[in-house]
Amino acid sequence: MGVTKEDVEAAITSALSPSHLVVTDTSGGCGASYEIEVVSEKFEGKRLLERHRMVNTALAPHMAEIHAVSIKKALTPAQAQPEPEPAADKPQA
Amino acid sequence: MASSTAAALRVAFPPLSAPAAAASSFSSSTTLRFPLHRAPRPLAVAAFKKLSEASPLPIPPEPTQPLVEEDALPPKPGVYGVYDAAGELQFVGISRNVRASLEGHRRKVPADLCASVKVAVADEETPDRTVLTNAWKSWMEEHIESTGKAPPGNVAGNYTWVSAPQRPPDLRLTPGRHVQLAVPLEQLIDRLVKENKVVAFIKGSRSAPQCGFSQRVVGILEAHGVDFVTVDVLDEEHNHGLRDTLKTYSNWPTFPQVFVGGELVGGCDIVSSMAEKGELSALFQK
């Protein structure tokens, strides 16, 4: 396998120093497809498009071997704050 | 009673000589296709004969045979109901020229479905669209109340009487590979995204996207009722080199790519997440 979950996490951590990061391998083991959730202060004042670009840039060295990256969330700490609490104790409707 | 009957209707509103408008509204999830938001004008409806009051006029089976004379079936705006040979109401329509619409139907629809017609012509020469719509609505309600069902031709998705909505074709950047381009591809892209308010560069055609992400983006845009154009980045004949050039132009590595007002909004992830948060509608209202 070319790129591991840890490689992806390390690349994003060093570029964006996220306060929250979830990398999910959705490839079924071959390491070619990932889902990513990032919360980082560096996203402050950036549009969603620019945030995605920052993540893509961070992953650029690995992209040759990764087939698909899906960025599920790219939030600032302020945006992430109100969300998780109610979502955690309420069952999904 | 009108509201409960209306709620029970699952009918397609006949386009009134405006196929483009019908096409753009087609993707909305509503199956009721008349303007519910407008207050009904009872006076306008009263000006038309009721369905049961109108007398049927025979339609000759051969399209070459002339229709009844213009006194009975005038080239004027109104509402009409077409009956099949067994006397079942097949379709209720409105038109700016009922006679011309009838001529159109009998050319397109099998003759056994077009045996006779009832017509109610508007009093005014150029009635407001609402007036005709209300007349159509009251004929439909009258028929549904007496039979319990809508005429088959008015059921949503039935394209026997009204034609299926046409999707605009995918845009092509060049006439073909054999043509030497006078301007760089980048400039063509630039012009394209600035001349069209919303452009989606997708893999595959609009009607048959060849990638799940492209399909989702097309679905989202259509669900928002957005008037957008598509460009197939896999079309090597007409859009040769587009994938690489576009990636550089937009500084974005993947497809689909959605541009609004000349600026890249994003790919599938961004468009989906904006749609979920309701940010997309705001963007398109600008």
Image: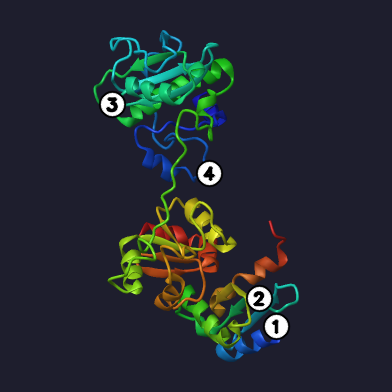
- In this view, the mark in front (2 or 3): 2
Foreground of the two, B134 or B18 = B18
Foreground of the two, A30 or B262 = A30
- In this view, the mark in front (4 or 1): 1
Residue that label 3 marks: B127
Q: Amino acid at mark 2?
A: Tyr
SS at badge 4: loop
Residue that label 1 marks: A5
SS at badge 1: helix
Q: Earlier in the sequence, mark 3 or mark 4?
A: 4
- The residue positioned 56% from the left and 83% from the top of the image is A40
Q: CA distance from mark 4 to mark 1?
A: 40 Å
- The residue positioned 46% from the left and 71% from the top of the image is B243
Task: Check if mark 2 and mark 3 are on a common chain.
Answer: no
SS at badge 2: strand
Apparent side of residue B66 relative to residue B275 in the rendered image (left or right): left
Do the CB atoms of the residues marked 1 and 2 lie less than 8 Å apart? Answer: yes
Q: Chain of mark 4?
A: B
Q: CA distance from mark 1 to mark 3?
A: 67 Å
x, y percentage for residue A73? 58, 73
x, y percentage for residue B98? 34, 21
x, y percentage for residue A39? 59, 79
